[in-house]
Image (tube, helix red, strand yellow):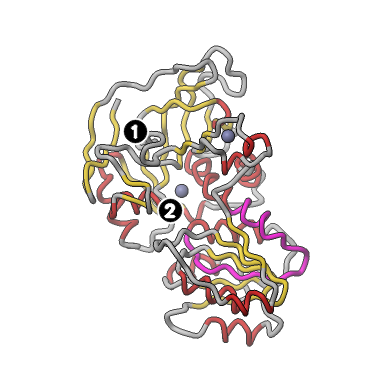
Amino acid sequence: MRSVLLTGIKKFEIKNIPLPEIKEENEVLIRIKTVGICGSDIHYYTAGRIGSQVVDYPFTIGHEAAGIVEKVGKSVTKVKEGQRVAIDPAVSCGVCDQCKAGRENTCRKLLFLGCPKQLSGCLCEYIVMKENSCFPISDSMTYEQATLSEPLAIGVYAVERGMLKDKMNAAILGAGPIGMSVLLVLRTMNIGNVYVTDKLNYRLGFSKKLNPAWVGNPDQMDVVQEISDHDPLLMDVVFECSGDPNAIKQGIELLKPGGNLVIVGIPEVDEISFPIHELRRKEITIINVRRQAHCTQKAIDLLQSGKINMDFMATHSFTMNEIEKAFELVSGYKDNVMKAFIIIE
Ligand SMILES: [Zn+2]
Ligand SMILES: [Zn+2]
């Protein structure tokens, strides 16, 4: 089969490699149809690493995918041959203390698709996954929509972790695909005002389609001051989705006493300092989000029912041969890109 191999910084090669085989009874061979390009893939492309996760070349990246079941292992019951599926890229062990506590996202032996030294990614024609990672989709759902259930699931989980109640106000700092997923989920709820910030004005344009109370660019204005002018009692929950340490600081300033800071974005630095007295006086709760747990089906249901429509975020599609063009576009934030896909033919 053909596979996209990352062979160096900003270097791809397309090679023929052996077809993966079903080795365990609960495994499924999936023919990949669509792969979404994620910010983490871009880190591997431009830097060859995310923190201590360093790529050993050659390596196949990619973890957002949908496809069609080609073959199933003996004990598989969740899917059958010919079924169209969304893929949850996380593979948990099912037996450790974390898995037993329902915290599969922090499994002691967690393996993730397209993550160096864990599992080879999905930028190729076929992959083998456990049946637990396969989620059947309806005939009306496109492969692009099914692929978008992966970032949406993180939005669903982040909102659950944020514990918003009716009429509460929230701010989303960073309007990339994850920040937008949080906003889409908030829009299905009966909450108060939502404020959105991003350093890219075109991304604020995307968020405006969902009618937030206000949007602003922190490079062009004092966003804390502006939001405080609108809502002097400040925010109940802030979702930090940018990974920018300055946004974490703004998030703390934007919270009212007793507020929740939900950290979803992945910073490039290893350590960040916090204004401890402000956190203490306001009794702020900091909540971390590690990918997601038990939210893939919820995300698919939200998309299938039409409660959430993410089609406007699917801005670009490329073939496998156009892989470099696709990654240059996404890494450069060119042509108002929100989510780009590789269509595997
Ligand atoms: Zn991702
Ligand atoms: Zn486990």
Task: Determine whether, in the image, residue 317 is placed left or right of residue 181.
Answer: left
Label 2: element kind: strand
When the figure is inspected, residue 10 is found, relative to residue 193, above or below; the finding is above
User: Looking at the picture, how far across and down is residue 3, in whole percent?
Assistant: 29, 32
Task: Determine whether, in the image, residue 244 is placed left or right of residue 102.
Answer: left
Q: Quadrant of the C terminus?
A: top left
Q: Is residue 162 magenta?
A: yes
Which residue is at 62% across, 67% downward?
A: 261
Start and end of the magenta stretch? 155-176
Ligand 2 lies in quarter = top right
Quarter holding residue 333: bottom left
Q: Quadrant of the N terminus?
A: top left
Which residue is at 48% across, 55% downward?
A: 313
CB of mark 2 near ligand 1 (< 8 Å)? no
Quarter holding residue 284: bottom right
When the figure is inspected, residue 229 is found, relative to residue 103, above or below; the finding is below
Give the spatial CA distance, label 2 vs label 1.
Answer: 19 Å
Label 1: element kind: loop
Residue indicated by mark 2: 339
Which residue is at 67% across, 39% downward?
A: 102
Which amino acid type is marked by label 1? Answer: Cys
**Could you tell me if the residues under marks 2 and 1 are in contact, i.e. CB atoms within 8 Å?**
no
**Dot in front, 2 or 1:** 1
**Closer-to-camera residue (59/295):** 59
Of mark 2 and mark 1, the one earlier in the sequence is 1
Q: Residue furthest right?
A: 166
Which residue is at 53% across, 31% downward?
A: 85
**Closer-to-camera residue (332/111):** 111
Residue 149 seen anywhere in this rendered image of the structure: yes
Residue indicated by mark 1: 124
**Closer-to-camera residue (188/98):** 98
User: Looking at the picture, how far across and down is residue 155, in whole percent?
Assistant: 59, 54
